[in-house]
Each structure stands twice: as structure tokens, then as C-alpha cells.
Amino acid sequence: MTQTESKWYWTDDLARLLIDSGQGFPKVMQRWIASPVAVRGEGEAIAIAEALLDEESEEVHKAA
């Protein structure tokens, strides 16, 4: 069995990937870039960015 290795990503880099691909919400991307946080994930960086954005979107809807 092959084990996938987790990697660390910075939210500012992930935000730039989303912006370059035409995705993301301006306020969220601005926050990710202004105050970067390290996140851990498995897979391609763009997939990590999209999943993180989805999680954040779900939190916003739950708070409303």
C-alpha cells in the first residue's frame, strides 16, 4: 500500500493559485494573503486550496 505524504502549504500561495484559476472570493483571498497561515494537506496544491475555500464557505453559511 502506498501512503500519500502530507505537505505544508501557505494560504497566501493557495490564494494566488485560486486567483490565477479565476476562483475565490476577494475578501477571503485578501485575508489569506495579508495574514498567511500554514495548512497541511495531501494532493495537489490547487485541490488543497479549493477544499480549504469550500470549508471556509461552509463556515460562513453556518454562521448566517
Image (cartoon, grey):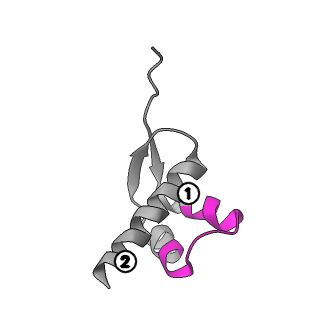
The residue lying at 47 percent from left, 54 percent from top is 10
Separation (CA) of disc 1 from disc 2: 22 Å
The stretch in magenta equals: 15-29
Q: Quadrant of residue 55?
A: bottom left
Q: Earlier in the sequence, mark 1 or mark 2?
A: 1
Q: Position of residue 45 (x, y in %)?
A: 57, 47
Q: Count residues near mark 2 (Cα–Cα under 10 Å), then give few for <14, some for 14-19, many for 20+.
A: few
Q: Could you tell me which secondary element the residue under label 1 belongs to? A: helix
The residue lying at 39 percent from left, 70 percent from top is 58
Question: What label does residue 1 carry, if any?
Answer: none
- The residue positioned farthest toward the top in the image shown: 1
Q: Position of residue 40 (x, y in %)?
A: 40, 45
Q: Could you tell me which secondary element the residue under label 2 belongs to? A: helix
The residue lying at 45 percent from left, 29 percent from top is 5
Residue 39's place in the image compared with 53, above or below, is: above
Main SS, magenta region, reads helix
Q: Position of residue 41 (x, y in %)?
A: 43, 43
Observer-nearest of 30 and 61: 61
Closer to viewer: mark 1 or mark 2 = 2
Observer-nearest of 10 and 63: 63
Judging by the rendered image, the residue that carries numbered circle 2 is 60
Q: Quadrant of residue 3?
A: top left
Magenta segment includes 23: yes
Q: Count residues near mark 1 (Cα–Cα under 10 Å), then give few for <14, some for 14-19, many for 20+.
A: some
Residue 62's place in the image compared with 5, above or below, is: below
Q: Amino acid at mark 2?
A: Val
Residue 33's place in the image compared with 49, above or below, is: below
Q: Amino acid at mark 1?
A: Asp
* Left-right relation of 5 to 29: left
Judging by the rendered image, the residue that carries numbered circle 1 is 13
The residue lying at 34 percent from left, 71 percent from top is 59
Magenta segment includes 47: no
